[in-house]
Image: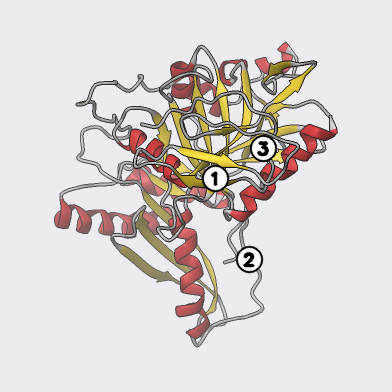
Amino acid sequence: MSSLSSALVQRVVASTQCCSSSSSARMNATTTTTTTTTTTRGGLLFRHQRRRGRKSIISCESSSSNEENSLLTQTAEEAIRNAPPAPERGEGAKRRVSGYMNKKTTKDWQIDFCSRPLKDDRGKKVWELLITDEDRSFEHAEFFPNNRINSVELSKALQKVVDRRTEETGEQPRKVKFFRSQMMTIITRACKECELEPLPSRRCQTMLNWLEERMETVYKKHPGYDPNSAPLMTFDAQAPKPLPDALRGESWAFVALPLVGVKEEMEAVARGKAFGDLLNIDPDLPDDTLIPGVVVYTARAAALSGWTKGLELSAITVDLESSSIVLETGVNESWNYAFFRRTKELRDEAREWEGVKRQTKGLHFLAIQTDADSETTDGFWVLQDVKGSQF
């Protein structure tokens, strides 16, 4: 596992380039700017600031009051209360999965149940149920007339898919993810009727990609296609809320890591040696592609990673108006994760970080570790900016 530690550096500019130095995936950085210097260690490029000749990390300062922090939402409370145990560090450690433990489970499924830009013979909107898993190892597509849109009909269709997959593979999903908050009631009831665990989440990239494909290969070729049909449901993001103190670290920094290093951290999560969550990454993306991220330092790294695991992380964005970084979770929740000083240097750095993220099509990460010299990472999440569905 690659270390996320780093020697202190001055600000890293967007022109930083990386090249592989050895099979161990350690990376060295060079920059075309003579006014900055860059040093790496363990593969991670940290962005720090120097003040009065003394090195310091951008501070993770909270401006929320104790009264505000006491107003924990149910999601945050559950994340803390239901935090899973820390992963074992031994070679034989197995990742513990949540959900209905009396069943053999493997992957999360992703489901979408919504109207499409199609009309039937009566001129009514056509609805569609799509079900797949994270790797798209199977696909189920089924159209519904608009007079069968309820949890009973959905549970019947879902149960048929579960029974078929159980017969074919002997396995059931760990959780069933869905990204439309407007369908939460129907999908949640249907999943529970089938004894499946529903999970509102924007981490449904597989489903969103499939929807884009179906737009070209299915919907536009359907005789009832309506090109003027407006999206029925989109993401309805809420204003950021104060983050509970228990979910904060002591300090943080904007960082960047070559994709080869990201893959090493992903392997550690997959082997159960760290908390986190993964996404499928474009296999054609070069290993030296610089992936932006945020690293959080805390003496409570294991506990904080466990609590963070209780939140369904989606993305991290920069809000220049409030000088904060915002953590997006669930289907429409967001949190003021950390704040930075309103200096031109830091605001430019924040813009630069978002710029690098756009170059990777929204791909980025969150890392949690004890300090900059730690040889292990306790939490690592692969994240991606997600736009509302167009369909």
The residue nearer to you, when weighing 312 against 166, is: 312
Q: Picture quarter containing residue 101?
A: top left
Quarter-wise, where is residue 207 in the image? bottom left
Query: Which residue lies under the disc numbered 3?
Result: 12
* Vertical arrangement, residue 20 with respect to residue 244, above or below: below
Q: Residue at x 49, y 13 (%)?
A: 300
Circle 2: residue type:
Pro
Q: Is residue 45 above or below residue 289?
A: above
Q: Is residue 185 left or right of residue 169?
A: right
Q: Name the front one of labels 3 and 2.
A: 3
What is the spatial separation of the Cα atoms under label 3 and label 2, in whole angstroms?
A: 41 Å
The relative height of residue 66 versus residue 375 in the rendered view (above or below) is: above
> Dot 3: what SS?
loop
- Residue designated by label 2: 231
Image coordinates for residue 383, horizontal then vertical, percent: 52, 43
Q: Which residue is mark 1?
A: 291
Q: Total of numbered circles in the picture?
A: 3
Residue 108 shows up from this direction: yes
Distance from Cα at disc 2 to Cα at disc 1: 32 Å
Give the mark nearer the N terminus: 3 vs 1.
3
Secondary structure beneath dot 1 equals strand
The C terminus, quarter of image = bottom right
Is 222 above or below relative to 312?
below
Q: CA distance from mark 3 to mark 1?
A: 13 Å
Name the foreground residue: 308 vs 22: 22
Q: Nearer the viewer, mark 3 or mark 1?
A: 3
Label 2: which secondary element: loop
Numbered circle sitting on residue 322: none
